[in-house]
């Protein structure tokens, strides 16, 4: 059990600290809304990965090659949409001053939708995570559960730590906060363009 638990923790740590669309989105949200309203977004993978893991384990190996290409293009478009929304919010200085649970709910669902339309989780679970999970489960359900528990506890915990760290940048002042938020919006847009471009290339 400890072997599968350690493997899950290792992959979860890598997923939490690797630069990507989700981490950039969490940066932008924490800068705009603070860590308290952004923290629930750390749990977004629990929402998005249920259908992803189920799809991978059941049918992904039988889907045509164009499936991931289409998903990459759609996901890139959604990332661009979020980047534009972040840019507009920073430019208009529309971040609310008071705590509002609606912001937290929006952050969770936006992050979950981004993950759901991102081909990387599908690739990970089909090539790496899925085989490990199935191998552990066939030995004993406890092994499979320990892998999943280690992975998501580290992924969520690591994301939560990053959100708190990102939010401390708000102490640098309004100008610095807006500048960092604008940079995060640009980086998010670059991720979106990259996803769309990769999807088009794979079609061609």
Image (cartoon, rainbow, N blue to C red):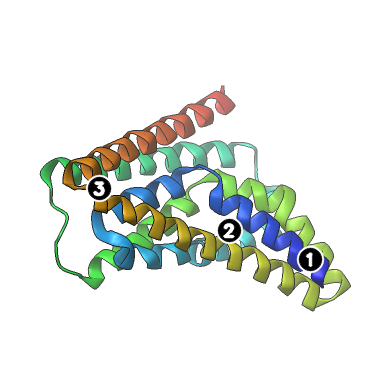
Q: Are marks 1 and 2 in contact (CB under 8 Å)?
A: no
Q: Residue 52 carries which label?
A: 2
Residue wearing tag 1? 4
* Helix, strand or loop under label 2: helix
Q: Which residue lies at the image location 38% right of the left edge and 42% below the top edge?
A: 79
> Depth-wise, is mark 1 or mark 2 nearer the camera?
1
Q: What element carries label 3?
A: helix
Is 13 on the left or on the right of 165, as rendered?
right
Q: Distance between the residues labelled 3 and 2?
A: 38 Å
Name the side, left or right, on which 113 lies relative to 149.
left
Residue drawn at x 80%, y 70% as measured from the top left? 2
Pointer 1 or 2: first along the chain = 1
Regarding mark 1 in the picture, which secondary structure is present there? helix
For residue 165, side relative to residue 70 (left or right): left
Viewport quadrant of the C terminus: top right
From the image, state whether disc 3 or disc 2 is nearer to you: 3
Q: Position of residue 49 (x, y in %)?
A: 56, 61
Choose top left, top right, bottom left or bottom right for residue 55.
bottom right
Q: Which of 127 and 12 is in front in this view?
A: 12
Residue 128 marker = none
Whole-number angstrom distance, CA of label 1 to CA of label 2:
20 Å
- The location of residue 42, given as percent across then percent down, is 45, 63
Eyeballing the image, is 75 above or below 194? below
- Looking at the image, residue 188 sits to the left or right of residue 140; the answer is left
Q: Is the C-beta separation of discs 1 and 3 under 8 Å?
A: no
Q: Where is residue 45 in the image (x, y as percent from the top left)?
A: 51, 61
Q: How far apart are marks 1 and 3 (CA)?
A: 42 Å
Q: Which residue lies furthest to the front in this view?
A: 172
């Amino acid at each position: 059990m400890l072997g599968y638990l350690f493997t899950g923790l290792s992959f979860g740590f890598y997923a939490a600290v690797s630069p990507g669309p989700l981490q950039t989105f969490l940066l932008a949200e924490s800068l705009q809304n603070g860590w308290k309203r952004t923290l629930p977004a750390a749990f977004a993978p629990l929402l998005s990965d249920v259908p992803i893991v189920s799809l991978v384990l059941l049918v992904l190996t039988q889907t045509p090659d164009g499936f991931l290409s289409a998903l990459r293009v759609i996901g890139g478009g959604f990332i661009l949409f979020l980047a534009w929304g972040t840019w507009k919010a920073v430019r208009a200085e529309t971040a609310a001053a008071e705590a509002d649970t609606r912001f937290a709910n929006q952050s969770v669902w936006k992050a979950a939708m981004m993950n759901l339309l991102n081909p990387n989780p599908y690739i990970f679970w089909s090539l790496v995570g899925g085989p490990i999970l199935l191998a552990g489960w066939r030995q004993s359900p406890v092994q499979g559960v320990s892998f999943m528990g280690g992975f998501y506890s580290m992924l969520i915990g690591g994301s939560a730590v990053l959100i708190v760290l990102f939010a401390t940048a708000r102490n640098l002042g309004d100008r610095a906060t807006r500048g960092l938020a604008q940079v995060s919006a640009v980086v998010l847009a670059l991720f979106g363009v990259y996803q769309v471009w990769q999807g088009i290339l794979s079609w061609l």
